[in-house]
Image (cartoon, rainbow, N blue to C red):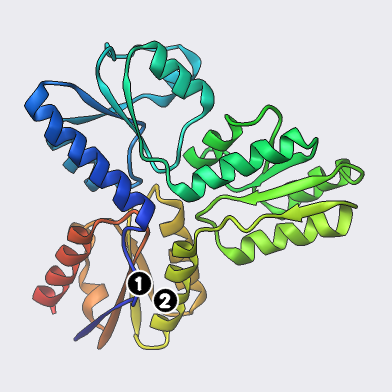
Amino acid sequence: MQIIRARVLGMCMGVRRADELAREAAQEASRTGQRVYTYGPLIHNPQAVADLESLGVHVLDTQAIETGAGELPDLKDAVVVIRAHGASLAALSRLQELGAHIVDATCPRVIKSQRLARHYEKLGWQVVLVGDPRHGEIEGILGHTSNALVVDAPTTALQVAEKLKDTPCALFAQTTIRQEDYDALIEVFQTHVKTMTAESTICPATRERQRALIDLCGQVDALLIVGGKNSENTKRLYASAIDCGKPAWHIETAGELRAEMVKFERIGIAAGASTPDFIVDEIQEALLNMG
């Protein structure tokens, strides 16, 4: 059995930076006695979140901060790390009111989207976000605007575009979606809206992992896509793997490996942008032992 890794896989720059900042905060807190939290799960990977928990980095309920409902720990003088997805202006203001020290680990590409959205809104354009309305990044960008809209499929895009045909529209993609999904919705708006622009906001890391997966498909007999089941970019990698027509599985840990996965001569491994290196290494080692 031969195991071939995708030429690009695992944590992207933004996620790795957020993880490093959280670990640095935990190390400093062990010296000062400060409490450390992340604004929601730092990474869409349960194992990585659990690893941070073991270092004393706890997860805050984002809804409790946004809405004021629910219980929160005493955050006075505590350190709160903002995840790579970013946070709304209201959430940042609330954390400051509660006395927290904020470490902003928002991905620079997400910050760019937030600033552009505010810019177009000031110009009087309708900001339209393309992505999952429940995703932290989209929620954060919404919190930097006053009336942005979200579309997540051609059907909803058509409904919105028809209503906005005479309104200038600026489209922004969630950084982790597939380019072809974004292009399909851009086409809907181009067809129905007189004045529109589509900003290039998909992270190159997403495209690189998609392209690396396509290259990998031609070299292997089966594919393992490694990453959190709640990770959007990993789920989209898995969807692309299925489209390749090869047997494919989406797994989080080595504990999910099954005998049917190791009966192939050449097995490919790809991993989402929030997948830690140690998990990929563990899965490869377990595969070799099973093979």
Q: What mark, if any, has residue 251 been given in the picture?
A: none
Residue 172, placed above or below residue 271: above
Q: Are marks 2 and 1 in contact (CB under 8 Å)?
A: yes
Placement of 50 over or under 182, stated as above or below: above
Query: What amino acid is at disc 2?
Result: Ala
Q: Quadrant of residue 291?
A: bottom left
Q: CA distance from mark 2 to mark 1?
A: 6 Å
Side of 231 where 31 appears, left or right: left
Residue pointed to by mark 2: 212
Crowd rating for badge 1 (residues with CA inside 10 Å; few <14, some 14–19, many 20+): some
Image quadrant for the N terminus?
bottom left
Q: Is residue 60 left or right of residue 187?
A: left
**Closest to the observer: 253 or 91?**
91
- Chain-order first, disc 2 or disc 1: 1
In the rendered view, tell whether residue 132 sits above or below residue 279: above
Give how far across and how far down residue 289 sits, in percent: 8, 74
Q: Which mark is residue 8?
A: 1
